[in-house]
Image (cartoon, rainbow, N blue to C red):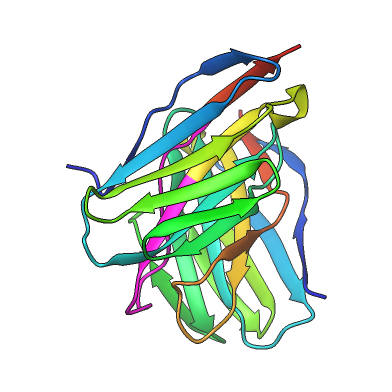
Amino acid sequence: QKEVEQDPGPLSVPEGAIVSLNCTYSNSAFQYFMWYRQYSRKGPELLMYTYSSGNKEDGRFTAQVDKSSKYISLFIRDSQPSDSATYLCAMSARSGNTPLVFGKGTRLSVIA
Amino acid sequence: SQTIHQWPATLVQPVGSPLSLECTVEGTSNPNLYWYRQAAGRGLQLLFYSVGIGQISSEVPQNLSASRPQDRQFILSSKKLLLSDSGFYLCAWSVPPTMNTEAFFGQGTRLTVV
């Protein structure tokens, strides 16, 4: 079993839809959770950063962590064509001795 | 503010030729530095990371090597490129001392080996 599983998609939604992107993980030591957005032919950029369980909201984006289920989500409200990108989840353990572990990314297309 | 520079943006190299990709970080001291490769359908593969000058950790055996000659400079090299070395190479940095904080990426180098 891979440490981090992420559905690669592609996921295609109409403009204005609510998008749900998800990752599951197996390592119970993971405490820090991140979402990155990567536009085509660009480097990933940090979108959201959360610690432990709970929700974090930033504008149209909400990150949710459920440590009991080892499941994290990123919700995008009122999706826009400019949200079309690949979204990668990343996570790390409290110890900090090893680099981030990334999911493979989900490719999202928002159709106008 | 901190910035990361990576160059070149694109590179086409023949099989058997050498490679040198350079990455520099500005605005921070003693960053953790990383080289990733991203291939279609395979996600981000960590190649090397460094927590200090001359300290390189390799994650996967391969045809590549890395060096950190200065605090904020990270170089990815190969003596002889293979076709399988084609991909999108990304340099990243994070705030020391631990590696569990967010990483910040450069814009990447698209390498095509022909």
Quarter of the view holding residue B7: bottom right
With respect to residue B103, does B83 lie above or below?
above
In-front residue for pair B102/A69: A69
Residue A70, x across and y down, in percent: 26, 50
Q: The magenta stretch spans which residues?
A: A89-106
Seen in the image, is A2 located left or right of residue B76?
A: left
With respect to residue B73, does A41 lie above or below?
above
- Residue B18 appears anywhere in the view: no
Quarter of the view holding residue A82: top right
Residue B45, x across and y down, in percent: 43, 48
Q: Residue furthest left?
A: A1
- Residue A95 appears anywhere in the view: yes
Residue at x 38% of width, y 28% of height: A7
With respect to residue B13, does A56 lie above or below?
below
A19 is within the stretch colored magenta: no
Q: Quadrant of the N terminus of chain B?
A: bottom right
Residue at x 58% of width, y 33% of height: A86
Residue A74, x across and y down, in percent: 50, 41
Residue at x 67% of width, y 57% of height: B21
In-front residue for pair A69/B42: A69
Residue at x 61% of width, y 69% of height: B93
Seen in the image, is B75 located left or right of residue B55?
A: right
Residue A75, x across and y down, in percent: 54, 37
